[in-house]
Image: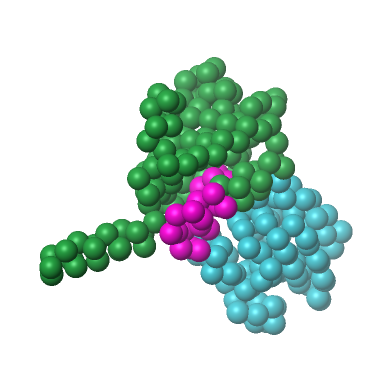
Chain colours: A green, B cyan
Amino acid sequence: MPEQSATRSDNFVQLTFLSKPENVAFARVAIAAFAAQLPFTLEEIDEIKVATSEAVSNCVIHGYPDSLGIVTLRADLVDGSLRLEVKDEGVGIADLAAAKEATFSTDPERMGLGLVFMESFMDEMHIESAPGRGTTVVMTKRPTSSAQENVNDRQSDHEL
Amino acid sequence: MKLQLEKIGRTLVARISGELDLESAPLFREKIDEALLEYEMINRLVLNLAEVDFVDSSGLGVILGRYKKIRSRMGSMFLVNVNPSVAKVFELSGLFKIIPAKDSEQEAIQSS
């Protein structure tokens, strides 16, 4: 699978780091800088930063609750879209459906909003998890401005 | 994240700058809770977010936690100067419905 995604990818970065809260800001800033290669608006870049922050924070809090572990973050440019993959090899999620409930949170001071933000701010989000084997989140987002250009292209083609 | 606290009467004004996320949230919680513990008469918490350029669910969680704390002593809480770049997470979370946003510290201090 990695080979296949590599051939489809126009560009990628991959970051591997320890599951420390200090690395969350680093991760979102790096991804925001990489995503700026696509014609995202500033607002969309802000949304990508929040989604990245949530995914990496989940690895730190839920993936490795009692220890430090490795977080792998890979960003690809695929067909004009940004594809983000955030992976930990931590404890995993036993009940994905429960985890997706908006009010679900294992910590009273957190609002269980992480997944809501990831789903709202990205076009697609997919989670794979197995207890004891870790969790992988894949998210994609397409710049709205490029969608607009495509529409314009099609319109001008039509006029010709 | 940097935090400046000022006590004005029975109001605690917290001026925050930088980012509120998983790394900075514990410090924010600690500093506010310390001040609330030290000044038991405080019944109003005003968060000035003018210099805050990033908030995620960890940041919202710690803000909600302070709201619960001030409510438990029958107090109130207000947000001031929420940047457009962070307003979206507040809107989406529904936090604006719980913690009202005001245009200035003065307005937040005077409103009932």
Name which residue lies at 68% across and 31% down: A18
Name which residue lies at 38% across and 27% down: A4
Q: Position of residue A25 (x, y in %)?
A: 66, 48
Q: Is residue A48 magenta?
A: yes
Please tell me which residue lies in front, A33 or B41: A33
Name which residue lies at 34% across and 59% down: A146
Q: For the magenta stretch, what is the residue range?
A: A32-54
Please tell me which residue lies in front, B49 or A106: B49
Q: Quadrant of residue A7?
A: top left
Q: Is residue A43 above or below residue A64?
A: below
Q: Is residue B62 left or right of residue A151?
A: right
Q: Position of residue A159 (x, y in %)?
A: 13, 69
Please tell me which residue lies in front, B26 or B53: B53
Name which residue lies at 60% across and 76% down: B102
Would you say the magenta stretch is mainly helix, strand or loop? helix
Q: Is residue B9 magenta?
A: no
Q: Position of residue B58 (x, y in %)?
A: 62, 48
Residue extending furthest toward the front: A160
